[in-house]
Amino acid sequence: MSRNTFISILVWLALAGTIYYLADSIQNPNKIYKLGNTSSVVLKRGLDGHYRTEALINGEKVNVLVDTGATGVAISQSVADKLNLKSINAVRTNTANGESIGYMVRLDSVQIGGVHANNVAAMIAPGLDGDILLGMSFLGRMDIRLYKGEMTITQVD
């Protein structure tokens, strides 16, 4: 391989990496390292109109979709396996996709920036793909404000 070819490959790889980084920063603006450690976090709405963020569940970094319309926290089977969650019991649920079976679990901790809660009810939803839905079993313990494309979540003690 000639030196010019090698340099061209490096330039294209650097360009592709930069484009990926910028696109990810626009689509997922709420990275865990940007949220700080105060008792209030401000999430920016993504291009799709949703609030997504990185969170810590039982100390493990995961991607969540903040869903004020969800009763609880819903976790896919693959993420539940990653977090080593064991179900308490099976329950029948009604979702937007119809009736299904879910498995109740308790999360030791859920944290977004410095906002946290312990002993949070959640459900393993085997049919769920993608992000964790972070619903009211966590959010109901917080003060939530929506204003001009930002969601402020404040710890309430």
Image (spheres, rainbow, N blue to C red):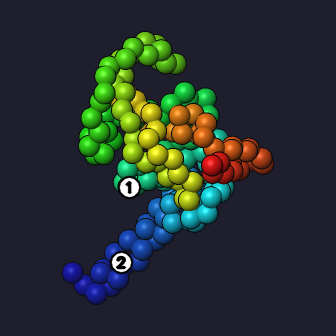
Label tally: 2
Q: Residue at x 36, y 22 (%)?
A: 102
* 17 sits left or right of 143 in the view: left
Residue 6 place in picture, x, y as percent:
30, 81
Decide: marks 2, 1 in contact (CB < 8 A)? no
Q: Residue at x 44, y 16 (%)?
A: 93
Question: Label 1, on which residue?
Answer: 59
Rendered-image quadrant of the N terminus: bottom left
**Label drawn at residue 70:** none
Q: CA distance from mark 2 to mark 1?
A: 37 Å
* Mark 2 residue element: helix
* 91 sits left or right of 39 in the view: left
Residue 21 place in picture, x, y as percent:
49, 64
Residue 41 place in picture, x, y as percent:
63, 56
Q: Nearer the viewer, residue 66 or 116?
A: 116
**Label drawn at residue 10:** 2
**Amino acid type shown at disc 1:** Gly
Q: Residue at x 62, y 58 (%)?
A: 39
For discs 2 and 1, the disc positioned in front in the rendered view:
1
Q: Quadrant of residue 127?
A: top left
**Amino acid type shown at disc 2:** Leu
Specify the farthest residue to the front.
Answer: 157
Q: Residue at x 43, y 66 (%)?
A: 16
